[in-house]
């Protein structure tokens, strides 16, 4: 093994590498101490392949490349269920079929319906009997042949029979079915629309409250948009929304208050045009016409995606590195969205300032090595 003095060459290389990293960390520490903004001397990275690009102002009137999810408005969809159990004997529609309100969807034979119809017939017969008995007793009372108490009892029995008949009729009506022959009924469409799901097939036995179909009206549609929390303050009710890939457009109808795990706020929009190529459940990218930010003096800029780094504990401080004078300065930058292949950020920058587009991760590592308590490896 080749040795240099008392050290092998391999060990000597490790010592020199550690010394170089320590020197960079010392210089960075001095820079941090001299300025409140984290910075690194540019001369230390002359051979590091650092590249910069001039920063450019981003459009101030539109938030672009927002992930969105197409939904059917709640008021425009129905889940069709059977109120009573039975055996499905026929299914007349399938997924994608357009249906009219009241159109038959399926036919079912049901012992439960048979029991309801039997109870209704018995209640009707009892009501007819009590009504005839009351009429007879009232005639006898007029002739003075019976006591008035007997007529009162007949009237009470007639009222009870009438109530029982109304109850049986209501039960049959609440079942929501269209009775055909004895024990058979049809399930009909509650609204006009398109069949989105079919969860039943002929020959299947179903229980009460089993969902069979989902029907929806697909115009207009609703868009659920995930907006970064930093940009949410720029979104107002009524703001125009666009889906460029489909040519759809609409308006913001609600802005959520809860913040999700991805630090986004849910914004709901109603799409009124261009929805023919969109379907429920589809994932798209949306754009929102927005106003100026409430943060005064801080503009929005388009920077390369590789320029944005996350500093601090757990990456809680997004920033970009800017070449100012002879230092690379870490400038706080709040990401707002995307613009083409760039990231739109809100930061205290100036037109044309050179932002590090390549090598930002290298500067981040050097800055971390310069932080108090860090160890060079």
Image (cartoon, grey):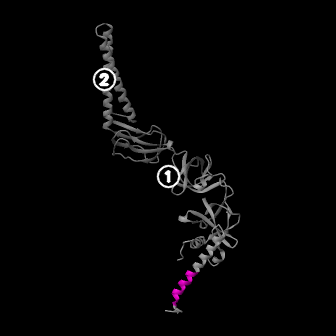
Question: Label 1, on which residue?
Answer: 281
| Residue 63 seen anywhere in this rendered image of the structure | yes
Contact? badges 1 and 2 (CB < 8 Å): no
Looking at the image, residue 329 sits to the left or right of residue 192; the answer is right
Along the line of sight, which residue is nearer the eye, 279 or 239?
A: 239
Residue 101 covered by magenta stretch: no
Question: Label 2, on which residue?
Answer: 126
Q: Position of residue 315 (x, y in %)?
A: 55, 64
Residue at the farthest top position = 143
Helix, strand or loop status at disc 1: loop
What secondary structure characterizes most of the magenta part? Answer: helix
Q: Would you place residue 373 above or below residue 20 in this image?
A: above
Residue appearing at x 39%, y 38% in the figure: 186
Looking at the image, residue 171 sits to the left or right of residue 226; the answer is left
Point out the stretch of residues depicted in magenta.
7-19
Q: Quadrant of residue 361?
A: bottom right
Q: Position of residue 253 (x, y in %)?
A: 58, 45
Q: Position of residue 374 (x, y in %)?
A: 54, 73
- Which label is found at residue 70? none
Q: Position of residue 270 (x, y in %)?
A: 57, 46
* Mark 2 residue crowding within 10 angstroms, few (<14) / some (14–19) / many (20+): some
């Amino acid at each position: 093994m080749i040795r240099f003095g008392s050290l092998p060459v391999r060990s000597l290389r490790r010592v020199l590498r550690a010394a170089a990293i320590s020197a960079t960390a010392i210089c960075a520490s001095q820079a941090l101490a001299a300025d409140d903004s984290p910075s690194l001397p540019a001369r230390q990275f002359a051979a590091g392949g650092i590249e910069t690009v001039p920063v450019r102002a981003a459009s101030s009137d539109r938030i672009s490349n927002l992930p969105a999810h197409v939904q059917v408005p709640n008021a425009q969809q129905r889940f069709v269920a059977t109120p009573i159990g039975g055996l499905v004997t026929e299914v007349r529609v399938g997924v994608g079929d357009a249906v009219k309100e009241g159109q038959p969807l399926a036919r079912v034979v049901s012992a439960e319906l048979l029991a309801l119809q039997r109870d209704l017939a018995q209640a009707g017969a009892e009501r007819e009997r009590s009504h005839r008995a009351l009429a007879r007793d009232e005639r006898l009372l007029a002739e003075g042949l019976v006591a008035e108490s007997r007529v009162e009892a007949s009237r009470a029995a007639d009222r009870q029979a009438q109530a029982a008949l109304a109850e049986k009729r209501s039960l049959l009506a609440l079942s929501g079915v269209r009775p055909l022959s004895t024990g058979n009924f049809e399930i009909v469409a509650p609204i006009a629309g398109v069949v989105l799901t079919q969860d039943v097939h002929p020959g299947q036995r179903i229980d009460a409250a089993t969902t069979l179909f989902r029907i929806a009206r697909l115009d207009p549609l609703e868009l659920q948009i995930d907006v970064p929390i930093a940009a949410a303050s720029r979104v107002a009710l009524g703001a125009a929304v666009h889906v460029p890939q489909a040519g759809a457009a609409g308006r913001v109808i609600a802005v959520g208050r809860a913040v999700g795990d991805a630090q986004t706020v849910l914004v709901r929009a109603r799409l009124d045009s261009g929805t023919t190529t969109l379907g429920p459940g589809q994932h798209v990218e949306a754009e929102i016409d927005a106003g100026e930010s409430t943060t005064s003096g801080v503009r929005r800029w388009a920077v390369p995606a590789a320029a944005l780094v996350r500093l601090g504990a757990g990456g809680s401080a997004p920033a970009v590195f800017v070449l100012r004078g002879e230092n690379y300065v870490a400038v706080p930058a709040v990401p707002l969205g995307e613009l083409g292949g760039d990231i739109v950020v809100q930061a205290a920058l100036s037109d044309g300032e050179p932002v590090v587009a390549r090598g930002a991760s290298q500067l981040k590592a050097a800055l971390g090595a310069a932080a108090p308590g860090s160890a060079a490896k």
